[in-house]
Amino acid sequence: MSDATNDWHPKTHLVRGGLTRSSHGETSEGLFLSSGFVYETAESAQELFLGKEEGFIYSRYGNPTVAMFEERMRALEGSEVAVATASGMSAVMAALACSLKAGDHIVAAKALFSSCSHIITQILPGWGIDYTLVDGSDLDDWAAAMQSNTKIAFFESPANPTLELVDIAGVAAIAHDHGARLVVDNVFATPILQRPLSLGADIVVYSATKHIDGQGRVLGGVVLCDQDFYDLHLQTYLRHTGPTMSAFNAWLLLKGIETLDLRVAQQCTNAAAIADFLAEQPQVSRVLYPGRDDFPQRALAQRQMDRGSTLICFFVEGGQPAAFALLNALSLIDISNNLGDTKSLITHPTTTTHSKLTPQERDDIGITDGCLRMSVGIEDHRDLIGDLTQALAAI
């Protein structure tokens, strides 16, 4: 890409970032379904493998379509490097594991997606990597947990499913004071609502499956970092472990990201209206939405997020039976553990996304049997409220 693209605004990057046309001059991004590439000469192949010549060698190392998606994400996020992976969890695993070794220590927030928690509390300890879980909202807790061998601090903000926020700049300062890197999972906020790198994060990860695709089609992940981290750790890990994004998935994600800003804006507008509606319902005991004044961390939300989020967490009276009654009465909103879709989706975390946690672990992060997480889509909010109204009556 030319230097002129550096002056583009984010909405332009969403549509044109990374675009490289072949000699055919296609309007849409080219889809290169090729596992390997040929070389003009043996000398050229040698130079490519030595890294002295730029080009594509093998799609596990790089692919033209995937490279366009990576460049679009890099430009949007403002990072030095973006690397696409096969899924969001492969992105998290790569970002954490590539630079850790036996004897190292990681500090993470307790409020994590269950698969992220499993990596930190089950997989990494098997490699001799120790961990400490902290109250993500308490900076003193973060500071107290840091050790001389702490290499990474990790959290989601907003967290799944309670939307708990972590002070990104505050934790970044603590991590850096102890020589550790900060890795932030920004999937709930999207790069439209929050930019962790500008707040001090070193590495940002996404499940591109969520808002970036946003239409329930494909899996994908992204790791964004500086050149040094990529050169020293991430590149070798990815090349030899192979969590490669397919060219077809990258092509679909390129098309999805074009409308990311438009979709997230409408989803946030809908979510704000629905959160206000739910807060007035007698069957609902509590609503957690960063865009509301009664959100416990409202000041922090205003400081580091542009809008309230596309997701709502709310609690119904009557525990799991009441939650299931509501879910089963819905006719428009779909029951699904996915999120960030154009279609509104809702799930019961206790029995789905966080079912592998112990009751005590769920209690520690505020997940009760009456907790529901709603991912708000782009439908007319009046229809969504109508569906919730009749479903609440079933409790």
Image (tube, rainbow, N blue to C red):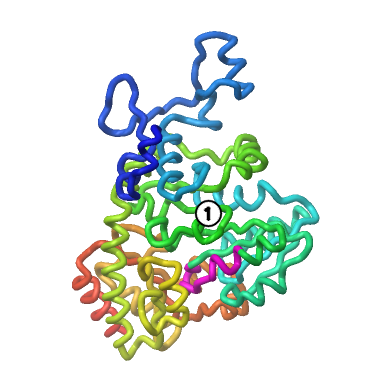
* Dominant SS in magenta: loop
Q: Going by the image, does 59 lie left or right of 358?
A: left
The structure residue drawn at horizontal position 32% and vertical position 78%, both measured from the top left corner, is 275
**Quick one: SS at disc 1?**
strand
User: Residue 308's spot in the image, x, y percent?
Assistant: 37, 70
Q: Quadrant of residue 343?
A: bottom left
Q: Which residues are magenta?
A: 158-172
Question: Which residue is at the front of the view, 16 or 336?
Answer: 16
- As for residue 169 lying within the magenta part, the answer is yes
- As for residue 220 lying within the magenta part, the answer is no
Q: Going by the image, does 180 lie left or right of 171?
A: right
Q: Quadrant of residue 325?
A: bottom left
Q: Is residue 128 visible?
A: yes
Give the labeled residue for mark 1: 204
Q: Going by the image, does 301 lie left or right of 392?
A: right
Amino acid residing under circle 1: Val
Residue 178's place in the image compared with 16, above or below, is: below
Question: Which residue is at the front of the view, 359 or 374?
Answer: 374
The structure residue drawn at horizontal position 71% and vertical position 58%, both measured from the top left corner, is 179
